[in-house]
Structure formats: C-alpha cells, structure tokens
Image (cartoon, rainbow, N blue to C red):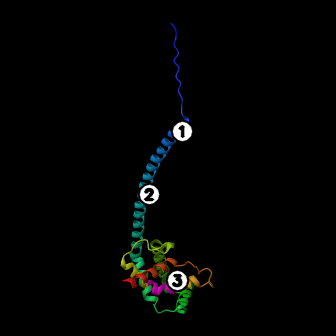
Amino acid sequence: MEASVISLDLVVNWDAVTAIGTILLFIAAVVAGVFAAKNLYAYRKQLDIHKEEVNLHTFSAFLKEISDKEASSDRGKVRKYIKSEYDVDDIKRLVLEVRKGKSSKAREIGVAAERTIACLDRVGFFLIGNDDKLKMEPPVWLWTITSEMWVRLGKWVEYRQTNKDDRDFWHEGYGLYFQKLAEEARKKRHEG
C-alpha cells in the first residue's frame, strides 16, 4: 500500500491574528476594569458608612463629655468667677493668680477654665477642623454653651495665644478650635 500525502497550503494572515488578539485583550481589560471599579465603589461606600458611624460615635462621646457633671460644674465656676465684662488686664491678673496658684480658689478657677476650653476645643476640632467648614450640624444648645463660654473665656484664650512673655504658658494655637467654634456660633446666632 502506498501512502498518500495530503498537502495543505495554509496561509496565515498574521496581521489579522494580531488584530483579533489585541481586540480580545482589550475586551478582557475593559471587563476586568468594570469589575474592579464596581468593587472599588462598593468598598468606598462601605468605608463612607463606617466613617459616618465612627463620626457619630465620636460626636456622641463629645456631647456626653460636654453634658457630664464635671463639665457642667466647670462651666458654673466659669460663670461665677469670670465675668463677661473683664478686660484684658483683668484676665491677665486672673491668669497670673491662677499660674501662681497661691489660693485654692484660684487653682479651682484655673482648672475649670482650662478644662472648659479644652473640651470645647476638642469639639471644635471635630466639627470644624482645619478646613474651616462645619462637618455636621450639632444640637442648637451647643451654640448657646459655646457663645456663653467664649464671652467669658475668649480673652483668656487670646491672652494665652499672644502672651509671649511667659514661654511656659504661651501657645499660639491654644484654644484655636474653640475660637473657630465660637465664630461659627456667632454666625448661627445671626442666621437664626
């Protein structure tokens, strides 16, 4: 038996194969990109929800801190001992008396003032931060507390920010977010 040889003259158009391969790779890349974008969107949405939950939890903790017994007592001492009509010299005298700590009353006033400023400073940092935009709307009573405390403690904060004679006590950024919160409270009062 004789073997027959079949000859196939197959001509391959390599340009067409390359073009088809390129198209298939492009389609695969687009499909992968769509799935990646969809997953990224879902992930970012989940992060945003988590961030909101953390923000609400943090803000809730601040509101509890502001309304707790110690903070309320501190504001009472500020109302009683630091008068809104105090001028810079009165505040300077009071701050120096507190700094020297010769009397327990002076120490008590100083601690109450510093804790009140620190508390409202933390709230201001959370609500306003460095971008000077209100991140969420707090309860109306916070504006009232902030305004009242700023009237009594604003000069104290400004003294601490500008008194460069006392390097241990001076701090340029002292109470900065309390100050921003007070400015926001002033705007809200004029809006309402």
Q: Amino acid at mark 1?
A: Thr
Left or right: 104 with respect to 60?
right
Q: Report if residue 14 is visible in the image.
A: yes
Q: Are marks 2 and 1 in contact (CB under 8 Å)?
A: no
Q: Are marks 2 and 3 in contact (CB under 8 Å)?
A: no
Disc 2 and disc 1: Cα gap in Å? Answer: 38 Å
Residue 157's label in the rendered image is 3
Q: Which residues are magenta?
A: 149-155
Query: x, y percentage for residue 179?
Result: 49, 80
Q: Amino acid at mark 3?
A: Val
- Whether residue 54 appears in magenta in the rendering, the answer is no
Residue at figure coordinates x 52%, y 85% from the top left: 156
- Residue 75 picture quarter: bottom left
| 139 w.r.t. 44: above or below | below
Q: Are marks 3 and 1 in contact (CB under 8 Å)?
A: no
| 187 w.r.t. 131: above or below | below
Residue marked by disc 1 = 18
SS assignment at label 3: helix
Q: How many marks?
A: 3
Q: Quadrant of the C terminus?
A: bottom left
Disc 2 and disc 3: Cα gap in Å? Answer: 40 Å
Query: x, y percentage for residue 101?
Result: 55, 84
In the rendered structure, which disc, 3 or 1, sits on the residue that comes first in sequence? 1
Q: Amino acid at mark 2?
A: Arg
SS assignment at label 1: helix
SS assignment at label 2: helix
Q: Residues within 10 Å of mark 2 (few under 14, many from 20)?
A: few
Nearer the observer: mark 3 or 1; the answer is 1
Residue at figure coordinates x 53%, y 20% from the top left: 7
